[in-house]
Amino acid sequence: MTQRIDKAQYRASLARLEGIFRDMSNTASEVSTWRCPYKNAEDRCTAGFGCRNQDRGVAEGELFICLSDDKLDYRSAWET
């Protein structure tokens, strides 16, 4: 049994998804002006390299704590 696709509904769904992703992208762009991209929601560093903002005094196997004050613009790191 083949189901016909409602083209108008399909276009509306795509437009809604595009809006959701645009909002997500705008938020990510804004946050990238001040928050390190390697800092997770628990303020832990997910970078696979050393950083002066890492507090390494954590239990073995735990992610380092990020001590960044979030006052840096990190965009230049990936715009070069």
Image: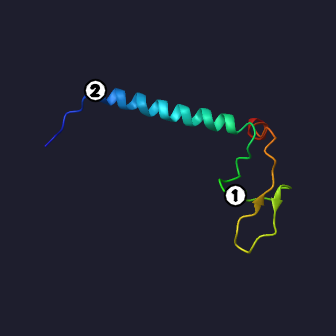
User: Which residue corresponds to the image point at 39% horizontal and 31% vertical from the top-left?
Assistant: 14
Callout 2 amino acid: Lys
User: Which residue corresponds to the image point at 54% horizontal and 31% vertical from the top-left?
Assistant: 22
User: Which residue corresponds to the image point at 74% horizontal and 36% vertical from the top-left?
Assistant: 33
The picture places residue 39, in percent across and down from the top left corner, at 71, 52
The disc at residue 30 is none
Q: Give the structural element (helix, strand or loop) at label 1.
A: loop
The picture places residue 61, in percent across and down from the top left corner, at 70, 72
The residue to which callout 2 is attached is: 7
The picture places residue 52, in percent across and down from the top left corner, at 86, 55
Of callouts 1 and 2, which one flags the residue occurring earlier in the amino acid sequence?
A: 2
Looking at the image, which residue sits at the far right? 52
CA–CA distance in space, label 1 to label 2: 43 Å
Quarter of the picture containing the C terminus is top right
Give whichever of 25, 2 is nearer the camera: 25
Looking at the image, which residue sits at the far bottom? 60
Color style of the picture = rainbow
- 12 versus 27 height, above or below: above
Q: How many marks?
A: 2
- 50 versus 69 height, above or below: below
Q: Quadrant of residue 35?
A: top right
Badge 2 crowding class, 10 Å Cα cut-off, few under 14, some 14 to 19, many 20 or more, is few
Residue 58 as seen in the image, left or right of residue 5: right
Callout 1 amino acid: Thr
The disc at residue 46 is 1
